[in-house]
Each structure stands twice: as C-alpha cells, then as structure tokens.
C-alpha cells in the first residue's frame, strides 16, 4: 500500500501527525474525512514508531477513550486496550478525563500515555 502525501509508512499502515490542534472529537472527524481514524497502538514497535513522529514535549490524540464506561479503555475500532503504556499514576480521570493522548516527554525514552479532557485542543495522529 502506498501512503498519501505527507503520511508515513510503517508495517501495513500509514500515519499522519497533524500540525493543527483540535479537540478529540474534531480530531477523529478530521481522520475519518481522510479515510482513516485516530491511531490504534497495537504494540511496542508501533509505539516506538509513533514516538519518532512526535517532537519532544508534544502531546497528540490517539484513538483511545473510556467515554462509554469509566475505566474501560477502548480503541476507536471497538477493541479493548489490553496492552497499555500509561504514565505513572495514569489514567487518573482528573476532572473527567476520558480521552487518550500520546505524550513524548524526552528524547531518551519512548513516549507514554495520559488521559486528558476530550475538549483539550492538541495535535492528533491518524492511521489508515
């Protein structure tokens, strides 16, 4: 499969990191409009690849939410999040945080996940 212009190939998929910032729902709509969806992280190699797409200090929406039932994190494709990479103490649902973000904090380690309020505006990662 060839990836669209400005998308990056990894395995059988193509990935896009936005430069604009939107809330989680708007970010997902933007991905769907491209024939994609917010990224579903399937394992460590994909986690490392995504980490390389982001700048240090960058947070980006991924396709993870517990908006249907608190504490039950599921991906946008409907699968449960069985393998996770949460930051220490996360997810903590501080002030009703129901959407998952990828956080790259340093160049020395692979980014971790955090729960955030779905209304927050930030970049996002699409996957075809």
Image (tube, helix red, strand yellow):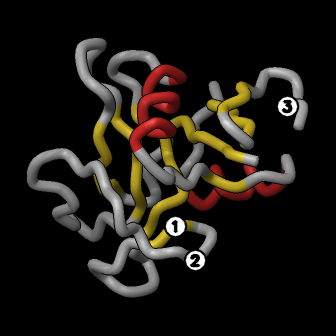
Q: Which residue is mark 1?
A: 75
Q: Secondary structure at mark 3?
A: loop
x then y, percent, for residue 14: 74, 37
* Picture quadrant where residue 59 is located: top left
Q: CA distance from mark 2 to mark 3?
A: 24 Å
Q: Residue at x 40, y 56 (%)?
A: 100
For the residues labelled 1 and 2, say whether their Cβ atoms are less than 8 Å apart. yes
x then y, percent, for residue 23: 54, 51
Q: Residue at x 62, y 52 (%)?
A: 38
Q: CA distance from mark 1 to mark 2?
A: 5 Å
Neighbour tally class for label 2: few under 14, some 14-19, many 20 plus, Cα within 10 Å: few
Q: Secondary structure at mark 2?
A: loop
Residue occupying the far top of the picture: 107
Is the residue 27 above or below the residue 118 in the image?
Answer: above
The answer to which of 92 and 46 lies nearer the viewer is 46
For the residues labelled 2 and 3, say whether their Cβ atoms are less than 8 Å apart. no
x then y, percent, for residue 54: 48, 23
Q: Residue 3: which disc?
A: 3
Q: Which residue is mark 2?
A: 78
Is the residue 24 above or below the residue 57 in the image?
Answer: below
Is the residue 78 above or below the residue 44 in the image?
Answer: below
Q: Residue at x 54, y 58 (%)?
A: 63
Q: Quadrant of the N terminus?
A: top right
């Amino acid at each position: 499969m060839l990836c669209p212009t400005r998308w990056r190939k990894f395995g059988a998929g193509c990935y896009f990191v936005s430069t604009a910032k939107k809330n989680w729902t708007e970010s997902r709509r933007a991905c769907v409009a491209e024939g994609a969806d917010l990224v579903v992280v399937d394992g460590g190699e994909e986690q490392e690849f995504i980490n390389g797409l982001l700048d240090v200090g960058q947070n980006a929406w991924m396709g993870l939410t517990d908006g249907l039932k608190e504490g039950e994190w599921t991906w946008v494709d409907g699968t449960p999040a069985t393998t996770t990479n949460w930051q220490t103490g996360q997810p903590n649902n501080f002030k009703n945080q129901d959407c998952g973000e990828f956080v790259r904090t340093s160049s020395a380690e692979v980014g971790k996940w955090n729960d955030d309020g779905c209304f927050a505006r930030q970049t996002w990662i699409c996957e075809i």
